[in-house]
Amino acid sequence: MRHQVVIIGSGPAGLLLGALLHRAGIDTLILERQSRDYVLGRIRAGVLEQGTVDLLHKAGVGARLEREGLVHEGFALNFAGQSLRIDLEDLTGGRTVTVYGQTEVTRDLMDHRDASGAPTVYGAQDVTLHAFDTASPRVSYTRDGVSHDIACDYIAGCDGFHGVSRASVPAAAIEIFERVYPFGWLGVLADVPPCSHELIYAGHDRGFALCSMRSLMRSRYYIQCSVDERLESWSDDRFWDELRRRLDPVAAAHVVTGPSIEKSIAPLRSFVAEPLRFGRLFLAGDAAHIVPPTGAKGLNLAASDVHYLSEALIEAYTEKSAAGLNAYSARALARIWKVERFSWSMTTLLHRFESSSPFERRMQDAEFAYLQASRVARQSMAENYVGLPF
Ligand code: RFL
Ligand code: PHB
């Protein structure tokens, strides 16, 4: 068997790359370790930058997003009992973000791919990359006990942080930059109306809290928790009580509680692998980098990688030019590092660090006071939140 591009992973990065390449007449095979339902069951991101929305439209999957996505013109920062609105639209000359769940993005991309006839293998086990440092790379896998070997021109490693692609690169060829934060996020999804029509990011002495949503009837809330927290020790009631303690009184009074339909703990990490290209293997999305979710950037960063990579591959096939492929790693990394910086700074501003000295706490207070006092400071936050240009 042979395909032009083998894409490993059917998360947002792999599916979006597949859609953009298919549109350009490039033949792709997606290999996904899990089942389709398993991938759709993971509750993750909720906020899309305009650039991501535009890319989804370009890929031909914007219709439901256009109908059901909630356009947000601002969000609130709560800090030490005070609330500050970041007016995205005003501060960025009219730019906004769209609240639309990663699950829905993934479902739209999967449906679109099925309708296009492009192949995806779910439940692909033992995916192994071969000879990607030569002109004839291959990918092998097993499915239902049968082995398969696929020849291709290029391999796109879109298989997330724990995938096989980055792990296949010799350690000496890759440099890792990493910060692991000493806390996680406990997230709850519930079919209750959101406590506010905009997102609320709350820095509090008891720890960070975030009020988000998936629709006008479905809320997504997070609270900072310790890394070794056990999910079993968080009843719904305990979660709602802790959430309300960390919000300003107005927001707390508007929290509508109800049974959780999903509850999970996510660790927080900043991570970048350099470079993103190894011969004919290209890394994109969480396979190459992780940001802590405080800036709502992970999915959006996967989309911007895919923008650069899809353009480069299309150029390689249609113009027989390797210029885009040669530039991919540097172009993508330039944007990745800026987004890493923003995600780290939002995390540092809003979380409670056990190890913080009194000086460091005062630095958090001062940063919030500066945001309150300075339009330029708010503008910088807004510019990053709506998304830096591709
Ligand atoms: P994914 O989504 O992890 O998909 C990778 C896919 O590869 C498959 N895979 C393999 N397939 C074959 N063989 C193997 N050996 C394989 N190993 C893995 C996996 O099964 C999977 O299907 O990576 P991708 O596509 O790069 O997408 C990245 C995003 O999922 C991620 O960055 C975001 O979810 C991060 N994130 C957020 N991003 C935002 O832009 N806005 C947000 O509001 C936001 N909130 C969040 C988040 C992530 C969170 N968690 C749980 C980490 C909130 C949370 C709580
Ligand atoms: C979410 O809705 O899941 C969400 C929103 C904003 C973030 C992170 C996660 O910064």
Image: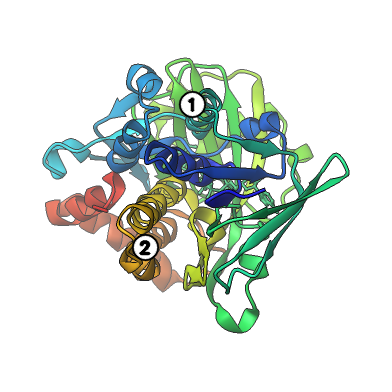
Quarter of the image where one finds residue 53: top left
Give coordinates of residue 294: x percent, y percent: 44, 50
The colour scheme of the drawn protein is rainbow
Q: CA distance from mark 1 to mark 2?
A: 26 Å
Q: Is residue 87 visible?
A: no
In the figure, 327 relative to 139: above or below?
Answer: below
The disc label shown at residue 332, or none = 2
Quarter of the image where one finds residue 187: top right
Q: Nearer the viewer, residue 187 or 119?
A: 119
Amino acid on which the number 1 mark rests in the picture: His
Quickly name the residue at label 1: 112
In the displayed structure image, the side of residue 105 where residue 184 appears, left or right = right
Q: Nearer the viewer, residue 341 or 137?
A: 137
Within 10 Å of disc 1 (Cα), the crowding (few <14, some 14-19, many 20+) is: some
Quarter of the image where one finds residue 349: bottom left
Give coordinates of residue 168: x percent, y percent: 67, 68
Give coordinates of residue 321: x percent, y percent: 32, 64
Amino acid on which the number 2 mark rests in the picture: Ala
Give coordinates of residue 386: x percent, y percent: 27, 44
In the displayed structure image, the side of residue 6 where residue 311 appears, left or right = left
The residue depicted at 33 percent of the width and 43 percent of the height is 77
In the figure, 20 relative to 364: above or below?
Answer: above
In the figure, 194 relative to 160: above or below?
Answer: above
The disc label shown at residue 61, or none = none
Within 10 Å of disc 2 (Cα), the crowding (few <14, some 14-19, many 20+) is: many
The residue depicted at 27 percent of the width and 52 percent of the height is 384
In the displayed structure image, the side of residue 6 where residue 199 appears, left or right = left
Q: Which numbered disc, 1 or 2, marks the residue closer to the eye?
A: 1
Q: Is residue 88 visible?
A: yes
Residue sticking out furthest to the bottom: 172
Secondary structure under tag 2 reads: helix
